[in-house]
Amino acid sequence: MGRARRRKSIREAGATKIQQLTISPSELRIVTHQDSKWKLGRDREYVLDRLPKNLAVDTYPLWTSKLDQRFIAVVPAPEPAPEWKAGAKLDHRLSATLGILMIGREQIVFDAGERGSSRSWRLIDIENVSSSGPLDLTATTTEKSGLFRAGSRQFHFELQQPLKESQYNALWRIVNRSKGLTFLDSAGVEGEVR
């Protein structure tokens, strides 16, 4: 595909045709619903890697307002207002990244500094959170990963400070309430649980 034709194709791919848009400090990656015949049916992907220095941070509010869970931010969200903050290690399969994990009313942010492994998620875009103890937190997101970008992606954090059970429960309720789960109070009446 020629360069001019590719640019026109990218411009014509409106928000409804985008399967996933990932922005990082070094690139903008757009995955569409179109199949790439030469790649065994994998979805067509466009990578823009000559970005202005602060494009990712400057355009973060635009992407979050236009796209739902299809937007993947590989940058810390600007000015998060955390209710809980601690050092954490983001486990990868064979390595890990140290950073700061911040949990706010509307988002979870992992700031890895200059290492390129930062992430920001709106709570409504998280499928589930789980924990095996006060120093452990796993977030399951709708981010597509793997060869054919199938399924969800889990981010496992080893926390350097304990996340209290009440804080974890509040986070779990917010995430699951956004999925339509309702809670019953002790009298069996639907309502808010605190």
Image (cartoon, rainbow, N blue to C red):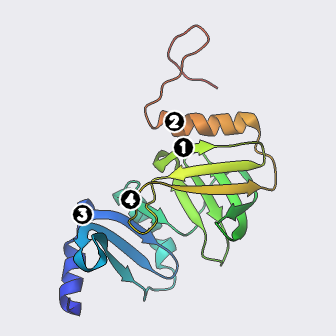
Side of 130 relative to 71 (left or right):
right
Residue 180 occupies which quadrant of the picture? top left
Residue 176: percent from left, percent from top: 51, 36
Up-down: is 139 above or below 9? above
Task: Measure the C-alpha gap from mark 1 to mark 3.
Answer: 26 Å
| Residue furthest right as drawn | 161
**Is residue 134 toward the left or the right of residue 59 in the image?**
right
Question: Residue placed at 38% from the left, 54% from the top?
Answer: 68
Residue identified by numbered label 1: 128
Contact (Cβ within 8 Å) of mark 3 with mark 2: no
Asked whether 90 or 41 is in front, the reply is: 41
| 3 or 2: tag closer to the N-terminus | 3
Determine the CA span between mark 3 and mark 2: 27 Å
Precedes in sequence: disc 3 or disc 4:
3
* Residue 77 position (above or below residue 38): above
Give the number of the disc on residue 17: 3
Residue 132 on image: x %, y %: 72, 42
* Residue 70 badge: 4
Residue 65, labelled with which disc? none
Asked whether residue 174 appears in the rendered view, the answer is: yes
Q: Which residue is mark 2?
A: 176
Residue kind at label 4, given as amino acid type: Arg
Amino acid marked by disc 1: Asn
* Circle nearer the viewer, 4 or 1: 1
Tell me the mark number nearer the camera, choosing from 2 and 1: 1
Crowd tier of the residue under label 4, counting other residues whose Cα lies within 10 Å: few below 14, some 14–19, many 20 or above:
many
